[in-house]
Amino acid sequence: MGIISGPQLIIILIIALVVFGPKKLPELGASLGKTIKEFRQSSKEITDSVVKPIKEITDELAKPIKEVNKELKGVLDPIKESFAGLEDELTIENPMKETMESLSGIGKEIGSSFTSDGR
């Protein structure tokens, strides 16, 4: 709703031409352009004055955290490597798996006894 389409812009320019006249219109356009340029520059300066200090603070706070992470990695990597070999040696069986397989076998035997009798 805030965007002006082509026909609307032409109507606004025609009205401005009629109201201000052909001599005053270029001066108004130039002053409007300067105002917009100054507004953009001011908003950029304000944004930079807020964002830059925050970035500097977060960078300073991140340095010790990165150092601690490096130290922890140096400690944890050998531990991980020592446990990597154990993973292959240890296999945890699912106790329910054996029970289900034996029950399945019993069920098949009972089912086959009914079919072999012809019932």
Image: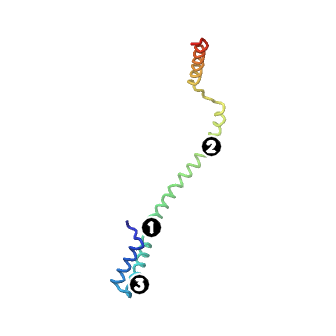
Of mark 3 and mark 1, the one earlier in the sequence is 3
Front residue of this view, candidates 47 and 49: 47
Please name the amino acid that badge 2 sits on.
Answer: Asp
Contact, mark 3 vs mark 1 (Cβ under 8 Å): no
Q: How many marks?
A: 3
Using the numbered discs, state the Cα–Cα distance from disc 2 to disc 1 in whole angstroms. Answer: 42 Å
Q: Is residue 66 above or below residue 22?
A: above
For label 3, the residue is: 26
The amino acid on which the numbered mark 1 sits, given as a three-letter code, is Ser
Q: Residue at (42%, 70%) from the top-left corner?
A: 43
Of label 3 and label 2, which has the lower sequence position?
3
> Which residue ends up furthest to the left in the rendered image?
19
Residue behind mark 2:
77
Rendering quarter of residue 79: top right
Between the residue at mark 3 and the residue at mark 2, the CA separation in whole angstroms equals 71 Å
Query: Of helix, strand and loop, which one carries label 3?
Result: helix
Residue type at mark 3?
Answer: Pro
Which label was assigned to residue 12? none
Callout 3 environment at 10 Å: few (<14), some (14 to 19), or many (20+)?
few
Name the quadrant of the N terminus. bottom left
What's the colour scheme?
Answer: rainbow
3 or 1: mark nearer the eye: 3
Q: Which mark is residue 49?
A: 1
| Tag 1 secondary structure | helix
Q: Residue at x 36, y 83 (%)?
A: 17
